[in-house]
Amino acid sequence: MEHLNIDFENSVSFVKLRSLFFNRFKSFKLSLVIDSKLFSYPDDSEGKSDIFWNISSVDDFKDIKFRSYVSFSEDVNISMNEFLLWLHGISIKLDSKIYVQVDNSDDIFGYFAAWCIDGRTKSIVLEADEVFEDSEFAYCKPIIDMSKNLDV
């Protein structure tokens, strides 16, 4: 896994998110940028981070408040399933739907798609601008419910 695009539906507590992120991945050098403010773990770490997460507020859509990008160095051995399970916990603890890109979804569905993680449910949604012109939403309603395949 090289990188992921992750969106948050609600405004979330970044203090809590930062704590959860740093505690879960504390064996790595971490950088978290929230609206241009840098947080690192360990605090005095220098050089390239193993996991870099950049989160920015957006006001282009009615259904998401924050858009982010996470990149993983080749030294990070975390599976997509493991990271998605961690995001399920984050969704519950921060009370926000989380949207995560589906790799190669345009090859599978013909459109760009994302996992929609909402507490104890998981579904697949299409990016709205792929389906509708000038949508005020980033994502469509779920097209496939994957909750039965969820191990939480």
Image (cartoon, grey):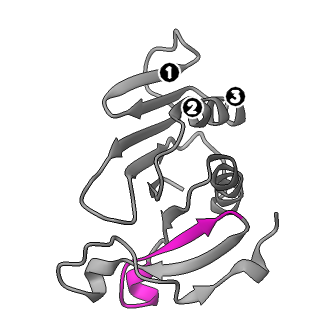
What residue is drawn where x is 63% and y is 55%? 91
Distance of mark 2 from mark 3, alpha carbons?
15 Å
Q: Residues within 10 Å of mark 1 (few under 14, many from 20)?
A: some
Q: In the figure, is residue 120 to the left or right of 102? A: right
For mark 2, give the secondary structure.
Answer: helix
Badge 2 is on which residue? Answer: 18
Q: In the figure, is residue 134 to the left or right of 39? A: left
Q: Nearer the viewer, residue 10 or 50?
A: 10
Q: Quadrant of the N terminus?
A: bottom right
| Res 75 quadrant in image | top right
In the image, the segment drawn in magenta is 105-119
Of pointers 3 and 1, the one earlier in the residue sequence = 3
Image coords of residue 2 (percent x, y): 48, 53
Instruction: Tell us which disc is closer to us: 3 or 1.
Output: 1
Badge 3 is on which residue? Answer: 27
Q: Residues within 10 Å of mark 3 (few under 14, many from 20)?
A: few
Q: In the figure, is residue 5 to the left or right of 77? A: left
Q: How many marks?
A: 3
Which disc, if any, is residue 40? 1
What residue is drawn where x is 29% and y is 64%? 61
